[in-house]
Image (tube, coloured by chain):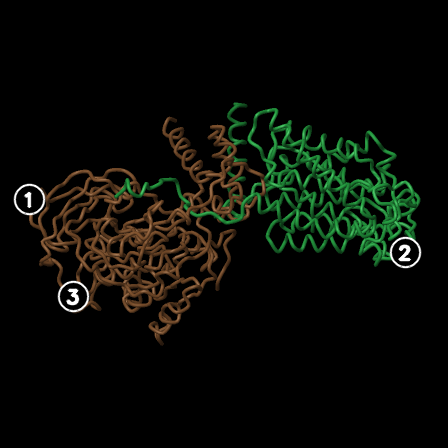
Amino acid sequence: MNEQHRLSVASSPHASSPVGTKNLMLDVVIALIPALCISIYFFGPRALTITAVSVIGCVFFEWLYEKVMKKPSTIGDYTAVITGILLVFVCPVTLPYWMVLLGDFFAIIIVKQLFGGLGTNFLNPALAGRAFLMLCYPVPMTTWIKPGVENWASIGTVVDAVTGSTPLSNDLMKHGTLPDASLWDMFIGNVGGCVGEVSVLMLLLGAAYMLFRGVIRLRIPLAYLGTVAVIAFLFPKGDVGNLTWMLYELMGGGIVLGAFFMATDYVTSPNTPKGEIIFGVGCGLITMLIRYFGGYPEGCCYSILIMNLCVWLIDKYTLPSRYGVTKAMRQEAKALEKQQKLAAKEEAKS
Amino acid sequence: MKHKFYGGVHPAEHKDATEHKPIAPLANAPAQVVIPMNMHIGAPCKPIVAKGDQVKIGQLIGETTGLGAPIHASVSGKVVAVEPRPAATGFPVMSVVIENDFQNEVSPDCKKRDNVDALTPQEIVDIIRDAGITGMGGAGFPTHVKIGSAIGKADTIIVNGAECEPYITSDHRLMLEHGEKIIQGVRFIMKALSLNNAFIGVEDNKMDAVTHLKGLVGEKNDITVEALHTCYPQGAEKQLIQRITGREVPPGKLPADVGCCVFNVATVSAVYDAVVSGMPLVQRIVTVTGGAIKNPVNLLAPLGTSFEHLVEEAGGFSEPANRVISGGPMMGVAQYDLSVTLGKATNCVLCLSKKEMPATSERHVCIRCARCVNVCPMHLLPLYMNMYSKKSEWREAETLRLMDCMECGCCQYICPGRIPLVQQFRTAKFEVRQLAAKK
């Protein structure tokens, strides 16, 4: 009977959730599609081609590295696809294709694979790729075009496009001047900026999808956006009123994209509930410090990268409270430890 | 009144195959029963019968040696062997093998009690001890020891009808069909502990049982039936206590230390049988189910019936079984041999087909998604415990409170990388105990 059935034996549990790594990553890709669509509408078809180039580049580099190193291929898990999309989302649409590919190379090979591949990189690959490009090519990385239907005339090339600026640029919000764009324009994404960061509406749609599917938790994004909101509300620049300034700070630049899609990156964010909140608050603080006092108009990218480096430290010091141990018990244990230490000291003295 | 516990998961229930099927007696009594001498936590019993002896139903065949509960014959017949046999726990165990003579002769020691109301608390505890009753929900802790340790300490009796594991419906059917035994049994235990109220916790996927039990409690109002939002591992002792009273059992302590005493509904029903009919624990209700079973059922079977026989009673296999589990899919033990038998704590024989087995990916990669942290009811960090123990850093794993892990399996269930976390923790716990023993 047993031979006929070939019983398999394993340690419990014998059931597992139907959601695997691949499903989670595919959900993130789906959540990014609305933002991509509106970018194509505002920035022209080049937004699509540059995204496609980046995705192909990332998947290719991942495949190439694993082929060369004779490792099992992971290109089917969609993580390289996400890196490809996110990297383009934080670059201007006018960036030459070869620079995008260079960024892909840095993100996938240097940041992700050389540190062990999926699950072991300590920086967000897409943001590290952007930081690398920003250092190497500051001018192309800060050339913005005005959003509008006219971008559709220049398919493939962008030379003719009218250059514009982002709401956060040095001559605008950096010095307390609001951009021409209305709050509604900022909300739907009718402003200059990186490919994927402009439309708050579409990013929130994607975020809502991820929350609904249980892909991300709210702690990091809420702590991040909340910190930015509180600082902007308390210390507005210019004389436009606290609330208006706060909304412009929240919707200008890339923090909505950063808070929901980058800071929540599993691999490079803390794992404890308390740690997630510390991480979010840290991102918000650094973002606002860079925006108010730094040399760059936007601080989202660096704030998340800096906090990425603190993740292991945060996790180490935010162990959840032990089950069944109350505050009184903890204090009692502490007092006892203190007493013992004192006793040991006195003993050593005598 | 109801409190929350942290974490938990909600696996697909799969209870519909058997939840409406009444408890059925065996169509054919087993020709032979193999009764292992360690159906409880503690020291194994010492067999007091020898090959060739005639035994009757309810006759004592195993005596306790330390912590434990006595063991009785579940069929009448001749002892054909006293030897180690494979058991559902995974190791061979000294067992008494009885050949059934199908006469169903009951031992003269098992006498009906008429005046049960006159029993003193100590008498009730003695009856429970002599009847060999143990926890019937999975762990198998001797019930009289539990009551004994809680006298004077406990202020709350909790009866566990949560049945949070998928597939299993034996407690559900018991509550529906023998609710009065449970209610009366709880009252006996209340008397033994000198308390005058108790809780019965039932998950809200069994609202019919909740309504039924509420009706049976009636106007006396001494027992509160609580409908609990369905969530695994609600039936775990610590989580059920937390859910109903809000108290957390400190590490290394017993439920009695926070004034609670938890019994499974099947245990309580066995207490009723022992007190009223004088019949020791010799049979139990078991759900035989799973995708590989032709006709899933809830059976009332004598202890020691082989899994093979139980599967036959359920119509046999409809397709080759890939995994046969004693217990539920979350904490049950996979079997390699179907000659193992029904024990006091075996609530389910689950035969999973190939289709039902979890998909395994070849690479078990942790993506640090922290889903394990968010479902762990014991507030642990499974991903870091796994990381350290994979590198044999047992001390580090221990400082992350590895020993608090109760192996409920929530972390591994939810893990998108399908990492065998619980297996890793079992290894690590073993190593930590070895280190502690060396000291």
* Disc 3 to disc 2, C-alpha distance: 87 Å
What residue is disc 2 on?
Answer: A240
Q: Nearer the viewer, residue B387 or B249?
A: B387
Residue A339: x and y in percent read: 52, 35
Q: Earlier in the sequence, mark 1 or mark 3?
A: 1
Q: Which chain is brown?
A: B
What residue is disc 3 on?
Answer: B113
Q: Amino acid at mark 3?
A: Arg
Graded by Cα atoms within 10 Å as few (under 14), some (14 to 19) or many (20 or more), the crowding at tag 1 reads few
Which numbered circle lies on residue B52? 1
Residue B298: x and y in percent read: 29, 60
Horizontal placement of B416 versus A257: left or right?
left
Q: Amino acid at mark 1?
A: Gly
Q: Nearer the viewer, residue A238 or A141?
A: A141
Residues behind callouts 3 and 2 on a single chain? no
Chain under disc 1: B
- Residue depicted at 6% across the width and 44% down the height: B52
Q: Nearer the viewer, residue B150 or A316?
A: A316
Residue B157 visible to the viewer: no
Apparent colour of chain A: green
Q: Amino acid at mark 2?
A: Val
Residue A34: x and y in percent read: 72, 53
Chain under disc 3: B
Residue depth check, mark 1 versus mark 3: number of the one nearer the observer: 1
Residue B438: x and y in percent read: 37, 26
- SS of the residue at dot 1? loop
